[in-house]
Amino acid sequence: MDADSNDFARREGEEAIALPEQADAGVHFIGRIRTPWTIRGQCPKNGLQTDAACTVEVDPVYAAGLRNVEGASHLILLYWMDRAERGLLVQRPRHANGSRGTFSLRSPARPNPIALSVVELLGRDGATLTVRGLDCLDGTPLLDIKPYYATTDSRPGATVDRAGTVRA
């Protein structure tokens, strides 16, 4: 771990487990995300809290998959939070009074540290995308890119209460 690993230290009230030794599946990183943030404390809490233009570098072998991507104003990026702790099941967010279950949070610390952001596509240059709306560290591995469809992806009536319970 880097010198900033204490940035991911456990807080009082958190609970962790040991993960199974054998993974159930494999993934292929299709690229890397470039952002201005190198330590966790610099990252915005979510992509709506920044106007920073970030770069998505798709590996050349996957570049053909970007064909027609410019037809979407917004994309869903799935990425692997490679520096996050994976065993936390109960967490204590900085902004909350008390602990919460990992699956009621958007925290990067989770058994499978998969994150998502809906980003605005600002441009494309070959296998490189420029986007706005990311909240991850520089060098984060990219898992997938999908077009955002407001007609099927938006749920205007969805809510989350203060305890983290989702209702839709």
Image (cartoon, rainbow, N blue to C red):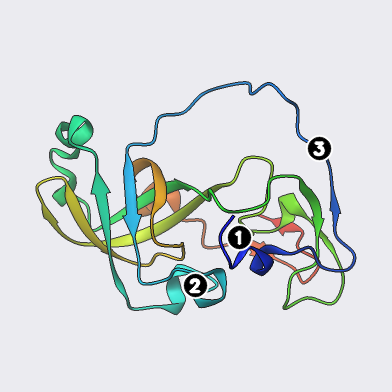
Tag nearer the camera, 3 or 2: 3
- Determine the CA span between mark 3 and mark 1: 33 Å
Q: Secondary structure at mark 3?
A: loop
Looking at numbered disc 2 in the image, what kind of residue is underneath it? Cys
Pointer 2 residue = 43
Pointer 1 residue = 158
Residue 147 appears in the rendering: no
Viewer-proximal residue among 48 and 15: 15
Specify few, some or many for label 3: CA neighbours under 10 Å numbering under 14, 14-19, or 20 or more.
Answer: few
Specify few, some or many for label 1: CA neighbours under 10 Å numbering under 14, 14-19, or 20 or more.
Answer: few
Q: Position of residue 87 (x, y in %)?
A: 75, 45
Q: Earlier in the sequence, mark 3 or mark 1?
A: 3
Pointer 3 residue = 18
Q: Residue at x 22, y 52 (%)?
A: 72
Q: Earlier in the sequence, mark 1 or mark 2?
A: 2
Viewer-proximal residue among 155 and 162: 162
Q: Earlier in the sequence, mark 3 or mark 2?
A: 3
